Image: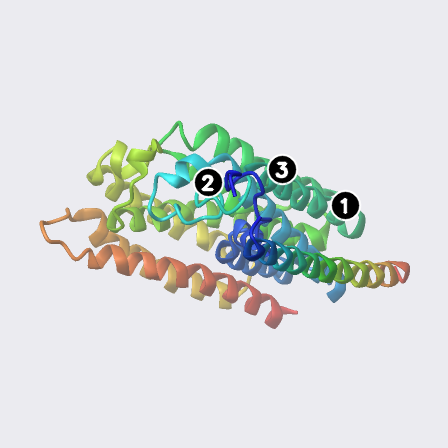
Amino acid sequence: MTAAPTATPLPAEWRDFFALTKPRVMSLVVFTGLAGLLAAPGAIHPVLGFTAILCIAMGAGGAAALNQWWESEIDGKMKRTAKRPLPAGRMRRDDARDFGMILSGTSVFIMLVAIHWLAAVVLALSIFYYAVVYTMWLKPRTPQNIVIGGGAGAFPPLIGWIAVTGEITLMPVLLFTIIFIWTPPHFWALALFVKTDYAEAGIPMMPVVRGEKSTRRQVLAYSVVLFAVSLLPWLLDGTGLIYGISALVLSGLFVALSVPVGLRTTQPEDTMKPEKRLFAWSVIYLFALFTALVADRMVLS
Amino acid sequence: MTPEEQEEFIRRRKARNVVIGLLLMGFVILFYAITIVRMGD
């Protein structure tokens, strides 16, 4: 055989296409989207509810594929992402792009014909926001990239809500805001204890650019704002007492765990326990808060 | 292509076709269900 190995490339495994959709991120997307759908006033037929969530998940998967198509070179420079299908050379770049486009387009189309035009518009906007505004434009340019990226993750409950009501009101916007404000302290807590190689890959992450001290202060500041924002649905009469008390306790703990992270400095041989605790809590927090929101709605109706 | 490569090629192509087939079937069922539900609106 004299032909180069690339002359007859093997077709990519279907599992690698699945991996392109970032299934673990998708589980959070499905959860918050479902929570928005269940917390919205009114009812949606289970088949249509399932379809709406499927569209949100497909849109997120398509956007994730486009993200990896664009960032394949950067991903190859970082240990955490070097094994992804594109940097590992298990798939052609164009195939990832086409896959992402098809998934995104299909999800918006189905949302449009089966659910509601406004839900389809916001879904399309969210995909554009993540794949273009965040990935291509702002992520490599500003240390505020995590704040901006949080906007992308905040769309699912908003879309789930609109799928039921067909309109944008204050409540779904508040749900959007909660995830938006939650993302920076969640991610920066992780960035403080995981030594990644973002700097080498040319991505300006906050702890690298502005320093650890500033990052810690901002984690604390955001968690205080999160405390206030998470109470708004209750204070503005959008929810009942179940959500109100849950938010008070959950967000109170969030702030309490942020205080040591915000005020201390990393010591030599540091085990970074406060940062790890805050990160672990931030994940539980989001699940618990949205579960409380749905429980509140179920009891009210 | 060596026989081993040939075999791997066929295996992957087949697995992909099965997955695509299942997905298409799923969408057919979903669209049928959506149509029935929306006709009742």
Q: What residue is drawn where x is 60% and y is 66%?
A: A297
Q: What residue is drawn where x is 87% and y is 63%?
A: B36
Q: Is residue A271 visible?
A: yes
- Which quadrant is the C terminus of chain A positioned in? bottom right
- Going by the numbered disc 3, the residue's amino acid type is Leu
- In-image side of A109 versus A271 (left or right): right
Q: Are marks 3 and 2 in contact (CB under 8 Å)?
A: no
Q: Earlier in the sequence, mark 3 or mark 2?
A: 3
Q: Residue furthest bottom?
A: A299
- Going by the numbered disc 1, the residue's amino acid type is Leu
- In-image side of A57 versus A286 (left or right): right
Q: Earlier in the sequence, mark 1 or mark 2?
A: 1
Q: Chain of mark 3?
A: A
Task: Residue A78: give x, y in percent of width and height.
Answer: 34, 42
Task: Residue B23: give x, y in percent of width and height.
Answer: 71, 59
- Tell me if mark 1 has few (under 14), some (14-19) or many (20+) residues whose alpha carbon lies within 10 angstroms of its own: some
The residue under label 1 is: A112
- Residues behind callouts 3 and 2 on a single chain: yes
Q: Secondary structure at mark 1?
A: helix
- Tell me if mark 3 has few (under 14), some (14-19) or many (20+) residues whose alpha carbon lies within 10 angstroms of its own: some
The residue under label 3 is: A125
Task: Residue A212: give x, y in percent of width and height.
Answer: 21, 40
Say above or below: A141 vs A276: above
- Tell me if mark 2 has few (under 14), some (14-19) or many (20+) residues whose alpha carbon lies within 10 angstroms of its own: many
- Residues behind callouts 1 and 2 on a single chain: yes
Q: Chain of mark 1?
A: A
- What's the CA distance linking mark 3 and mark 2? 14 Å
Q: Is residue A248 visible?
A: no
The residue under label 2 is: A149
